[in-house]
Amino acid sequence: MSNTPDVVRTVKELRGITAEWRRDGEASALIPTMGALHEGHLSLIDLAHEHADRSVVSIFVNPKQFSPAEDLATYPRDEEGDLEKLYERDADLVYIPDGPEMYPPDFSTSIGVEGMSQSLCGASRPHFFGGVATVVAKLLIQAQCDYAVFGEKDYQQLLVVRRMARDLNIPTEILGAPTVREDDGLAMSSRNQYLSRQDREMAPHLYAVLENVAESIRAGVAVGKALHEGVQVLAQAGFDVDYLELRDGRTLEPIDALTESSGRIFAGAYLGKTRLIDNIAV
Ligand code: PAF
């Protein structure tokens, strides 16, 4: 391997380095990932460096956020490629714990964020946000950074993590970073590589429909009608739509009119076996 950033694999090593940064008066930011890094992840490092002197990227494919029927075994993994990208993007440190380092055999704790974990993605993936909240709480406590950065593409995840950190008094500020898109509008995701060529051509319709629905709502079309039409367009394009909803972007409460400036449209849909999610502010 040519050039790689510093890598640690244990909590002890990680804490040693972040504590040293703190002693030196340097602020640090954690970027939690499951690897298979793309430009969306790398943009989180850029945002981290706008707030902090030092960045640490974690790579851990978290089994607790996959159901037995999901793609844990086949989830894309490319440690060597990831390390090269992180070196090029000036990540200061990479934390790659193995399974037992994160979850010792007698691990018995789980964290659940009631309410906002149950709707949208949580309705069809009931295991998901508990698994995310548990691993992210651990990562925040392990790294003890000043900031942690999450992409707005997973907006519900961002809100769940923010609520969890607040509720548990974890003193890490949670930052959200704008979604990074391919030239045709498709939100970048590690799972995009599962798409067949034909599905990859259809995939940008998801973002296009979000844009169209937002425009209709802004133009005064009734929210229910605009969403219904959006679902129909997606179904015609071959999507199996899980949800297309207008929600309050701060609380995730359902809203049926644009009374406030915080309305956000959320979509989750399958193309073949690949689940795509996206969201935009209205
Ligand atoms: O968004 C992800 O990649 C994961 O859900 C996260 C935040 C790294 C937790 O495993």
Image: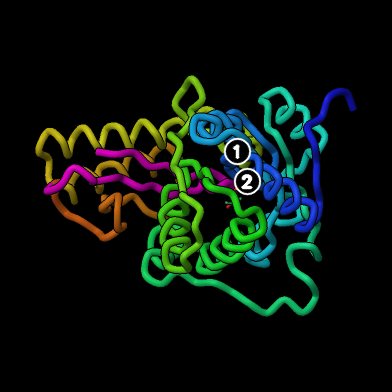
Residue at x-position 54% and y-position 68%: 130
Q: In the drawing, does residue 17 fall left or right of residue 258?
A: right
Amino acid at dot 1: Glu
Q: Residues within 10 Å of mark 2 (few under 14, many from 20)?
A: some
Residue drawn at x 52%, y 43% is 149
- Residues marked 1 and 2 touching at CB (< 8 Å): yes
Q: Please give left or right for residue 121 compared with residue 262 in the image.
A: right
Depth order, front residue of 200/147:
147
Which range is magenta?
259-282
Left or right position of 119 against 230: right
Residue at 59% across / 28% down in the picture?
A: 39
From this view, report whether residue 63 is shown above or below residue 16.
below
Mark 2 lies on a secondary structure that is: helix
Q: Which residue is mark 1?
A: 26
Residue 22: mark: 2
Instruction: Look at the magenta stretch and give its main secondary structure.
Output: strand
Quarter of the picture holding the N terminus: top right
Name the residue at the top extreme.
183
Q: Residue at x 81, y 57 (%)?
A: 98
> The residue tagged with tag 1: helix, strand or loop?
loop
Q: Is mark 1 within 8 Å of ligand 1?
A: no
| Nearest to the observer: residue 236 or residue 215 | 215
> Residue 135, image x and y in percent?
62, 61
Q: Is residue 250 left or right of residue 83?
A: left
Q: Residues within 10 Å of mark 1 (few under 14, many from 20)?
A: some
